[in-house]
Image: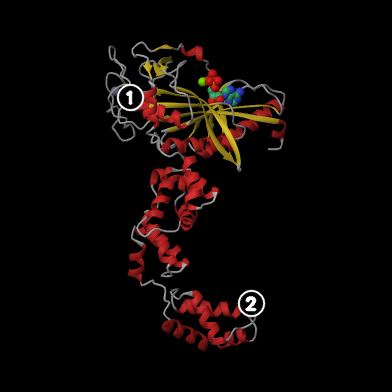
């Protein structure tokens, strides 16, 4: 982006994450809205029937505090819920219970790297609210365009993580969001699934002349359901804003939607302001006093977080920072790595890392492991690595075998036994193959003796073919040299 050298982009993300509790935020209904029949998981509270009263879900409060602590936030002693009033058919109460001026936490930060450079983004606040229902645009019913409403999702606990406008490029925004997602997964808050909407991200984007210290007019972008689309939408929006300013236009504060197939942002509505929502304290809920003892109790439930785990992978397993960063970006992948290294019999960490980040991730991209699982079990990967390291099979066979183990779910050891794949290292059998190949390829044998090193590679290849790939290539090489003499230097 040539023109962007004269402008600087300013980006702040607002991330919504559903909290994996069994019951909803203010009632006992199940949070299962993905598989339950429409409106099965509803009650007077989440249907907003008159006279019903909400009760705060303690687990959701604790999950929010746990996330806030993982993001280095302060946890004030006093917090309350507020009503955010607006009309939409998926919002049965006509307001959302959220938090306005006294959120559960504030003033945190998240550290990460982009291209090896350390970066930091402030966390304004992490607060707790409830999700809305879902509309299904059903086409024509009784000669009118109609929508159906499913309120199973209404009242599902939702956490909002508001980031400071500290990000300066689409790359930084993607990295920040990747790290944030990993923290949510590690803390057991959310499975990080963007496609099903359990994790959502709105991006606020503005630009300003390079060197300026005030912010430009921001645009909020919605509807991105993958990391790729977050990145693309921000890139597009920066470029669009530069073009508006360069052509003498002015930017308006608005909400735009990301159209993924077309790769553009489209104006949806002008910006609404806090006063439009007529916030006021929720009269049906008591304010919460968060004792220091409670906070410390929650702090003790924090698991090892991605940054700490990455540092441990480097020191304990002697991995590169690069590999350790990739492996710990997803808890599922990091767990898989450790399980393979520690599996019965174990496997060398560097080899496990190479297989995960190489062949295994080509079979199924590691981003998909969180939802679809790893392509095979950690114990089977460890076994495969041991079969190669012990010389039972060649590295090349190992790659073939990996595909078979993934497809069949069978243990690599059993596949080797079933198919008689064990590498042949016995001198008698190898010697017989080598002699046969020398006899059948007199010309190449002469060539090698006469000073053509390439001829040896050909002969090794013939032995491998004769053995159906089971001969150990190093041994074959040595035996051929024994039979034919040392050959030319470097041969
Ligand atoms: P609003 O009142 O419109 O909700 P906030 O100040 O609460 O705005 O900020 C909402 C989000 O927008 C935050 O993530 C913040 O970092 C981001 N943001 C605020 N100002 C800007 C700006 N000028 N450019 C880009 N992002 C911004
Ligand atoms: Zn309910
Ligand atoms: Mg805001």
Check disc 2: other Cα within 10 Å, few if <14, some if 14-19, many if 20+.
few
Mark 2 lies on residue: 490
Task: Measure how far apart labels 2 and 1 are at the Cα level.
Answer: 73 Å
Label of residue 58 in the image? 1
On the picture, is 228 further left or further right than 5?
Answer: left
On the picture, is 448 further left or further right than 245?
Answer: left
How far from the left and from the top, in percent, is residue 426?
41, 80
Is disc 1 placed on a helix, strand or loop? Answer: helix
Is disc 2 placed on a helix, strand or loop? Answer: loop
Which residue occupies the foreground of this view, 313 or 373?
Answer: 313
Label of residue 368 in the image? none
- Circle nearer the N terminus (2, 1): 1
- State the image quarter where residue 454 is shown: bottom right
**Against 222, is 453 above or below?**
below
How far from the left and from the top, in percent, is residue 229?
53, 37
Which residue occupies the foreground of this view, 137 or 373?
Answer: 373
**Against 30, is 289 above or below?**
above
- State the image quarter where residue 249 is shown: top right
Which residue occupies the foreground of this view, 210 or 341?
Answer: 341
Identify the residue shown where x is 46% and y is 84%. 431
Identify the residue shown where x is 41% and y is 70%. 392
């Amino acid at each position: 982006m040539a023109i962007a050298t004269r402008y600087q982009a300013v980006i702040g993300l607002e991330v919504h994450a559903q909290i994996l509790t069994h019951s909803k935020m203010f009632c006992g209904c199940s949070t299962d809205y993905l598989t339950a029949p429409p409106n099965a998981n509803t009650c007077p509270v989440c249907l907003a029937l008159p006279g019903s009263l909400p009760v705060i879900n303690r687990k959701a409060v604790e999950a929010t505090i746990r996330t806030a602590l993982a993001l280095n936030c302060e946890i004030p002693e006093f917090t309350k819920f507020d009503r955010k009033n607006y009309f939409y058919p998926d919002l049965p109460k006509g307001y959302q219970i959220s938090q306005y001026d006294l959120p559960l936490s504030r003033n945190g930060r998240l550290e990460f790297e982009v291209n090896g450079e350390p970066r930091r983004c402030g966390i304004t606040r992490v607060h707790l609210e409830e999700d809305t229902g879902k509309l299904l645009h059903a086409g024509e019913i009784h000669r009118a365009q109609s929508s159906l409403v499913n309120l199973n999702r209404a009242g599902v606990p939702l956490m909002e993580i508001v980031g400071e406008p500290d990000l300066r490029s689409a790359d930084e925004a993607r990295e920040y969001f990747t790290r944030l997602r990993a923290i949510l997964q590690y803390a057991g808050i959310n499975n990080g699934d963007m496609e099903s909407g359990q994790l959502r991200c709105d991006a606020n984007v503005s630009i300003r002349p390079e060197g300026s210290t005030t912010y430009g007019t921001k645009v909020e972008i919605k509807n991105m359901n993958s990391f790729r689309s977050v990145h693309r939408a921000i890139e597009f929006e920066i470029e669009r804003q530069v073009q508006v300013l360069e052509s003498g236009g002015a930017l308006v504060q608005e909400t735009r939607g990301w159209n993924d197939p077309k790769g553009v942002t489209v104006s949806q509505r002008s910006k609404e302001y806090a006063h439009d929502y007529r916030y006021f304290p929720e009269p049906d809920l008591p304010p919460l006093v968060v004792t220091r003892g409670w906070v410390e109790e929650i702090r003790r439930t924090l698991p090892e977080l991605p940054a700490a785990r990455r540092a441990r992978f480097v020191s304990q397993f002697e991995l590169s920072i690069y590999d350790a960063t990739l492996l710990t970006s997803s808890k599922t992948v990091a767990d898989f790595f450790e399980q393979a290294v520690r599996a019965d019999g174990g496997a060398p960490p560097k080899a496990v890392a190479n297989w995960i980040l190489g062949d295994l991730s080509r079979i199924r991209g590691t981003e998909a492991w969180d939802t679809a699982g790893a392509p095979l079990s950690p114990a089977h990967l460890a076994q495969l690595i041991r079969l190669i390291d012990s010389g039972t099979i060649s590295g090349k066979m190992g790659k073939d075998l990996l595909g078979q183990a993934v497809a069949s779910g069978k243990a690599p050891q059993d596949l080797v036994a079933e198919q008689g794949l064990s590498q042949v290292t016995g001198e008698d059998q190898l010697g017989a193959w080598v002699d046969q190949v020398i006899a059948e390829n007199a010309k190449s044998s002469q060539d090698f003796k006469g000073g053509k090193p390439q001829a040896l590679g050909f002969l090794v290849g013939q032995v491998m073919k004769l053995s159906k790939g089971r001969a150990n290539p190093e041994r074959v090489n040595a035996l051929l040299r024994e039979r034919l003499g040392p050959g030319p230097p470097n041969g």
